[in-house]
Image (tube, rainbow, N blue to C red):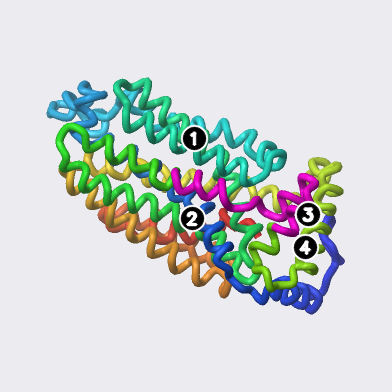
Amino acid sequence: MAREGFPAADGGERERERDRVQGYGNGRVTISVVVTCLMAASCGLIFGYDIGVSGGVTQMQSFLEKFFPEVLREMKGANRDAYCKFDNQMLTAFTSSLYIAGMLSSLVASRVTKRVGRQAVMLTGGVLFLAGSVFNAAALNITMLILGRMLLGFGVGFTAQAAPLYLAETAPAKWRGAFTTAYNFFLVLGTLAVTVTNYFTNRIPGWGWRVSLGLAGVPASIVVLGAIFVPDTPSSLVMRGHPDRARASLQRIRGVDTDVSDEFKDIVVAVEEARRNNEGAFERLRGKGYRHYIVMMVAIPAFFELTGMIVISVFSPVLFRTVGFNSQKVVLGSVILSLVNLSSVAVSTFVVDRAGRRFLFLVGGIAMMFCQVRNTDTPALVCHVYARANLYFFLLIRRRTC
């Protein structure tokens, strides 16, 4: 008997349906798919860059001299706890403003994305990214810094909603897991890029921090140009009442010599079914058949955040600085962690469509528990490298759209 809200189907039917869907376009990856997915994944690159850049520049002497001289004075003192030297409200506001703006914009991002389409949201997000990077690079005071970070945060809030949808709705069904992983792969790549950038710009006296903050404009430009030239996703166009444009978009994505009739019919059926399910959706979510899904939907991200790994990801340069590393070694330590992250995501990309999401979820969760326990008697940097490797196996599960 099927659970409430889910159609009854035996294993054979599900297997045949999966094989039929994965056969669309013979699973071919066209140039259009690659370009579209690279544009969407670049939003992850900017997000990862902005996550890493704040921790890097806030330990640069030239940046602190310009905007937070009181922190620099506290760092030279020997009579206070190392962490308290960075206990500055404006410095905290610089870092957290991006996340506050991202949280606020994410509250409306879903409705906006549904109403105006994925392409328009990606274009808007790219413009916000570009404006934020310009404000930060040209900052003359703390107000400009925080305003720039807020613009970046608004861009993150909208594109973090649209980019994974863009990837999932564009990629061939056979390779959907690997393509949707691209957002997370580029996010980690952005973190690695900024740590390497910080390693070299930290040696530039006076204005090295401007280079670190301003280089976020490079991937932002890629997103803007890509969003101008690539089409919206077929699902989004059908949802907004443009079936002819949707079919043309699907044909362009799959290739001019590919028969897209069956796939297009399935997209139309899926959109119509989604519209019907919208009626009374919240009432059904309270039903018994969905209760355990709701619990897991809330519990997984909540407990993931409570592990503290995201905080360490953002503030690892500052943490290394407070335990006595000099400026260059701080950045080098962050580079090592980013390389571990990138390697883990690369492995996950090849494993996800073969072993499945549940396997990665279990492996990543168990490994994270082990590393959290070992953290009590293992040197912090070594344990953190192990934990960060498994963090991204775990994080990969949260970003699965299909």
Q: x and y percent of residue 389 in the render?
A: 39, 60
- The residue mark sitting in front, 3 or 2, is 3
Mark 3 element type: helix
Question: Image quarter for residue 94?
Answer: top left
**237 left or right of 209 in image:** right
User: Mark 3: which amino acid?
Assistant: Asp
Left or right of 382? Residue 165 is right
Determine the secondary structure under disc 2.
helix
Going by the numbered disc 1, the residue's amino acid type is: Leu
**Sequence order check: which comes first, mark 2 or mark 4?**
2
Q: Which mark is residue 264?
A: 4
Per the rendering, the mark at residue 184 is: 2
Q: Are marks 3 and 2 in contact (CB under 8 Å)?
A: no
* Label ID, residue 244: 3
Q: Say which label, 3 or 1, has the lower sequence index.
A: 1
* Residue identified by numbered label 1: 128
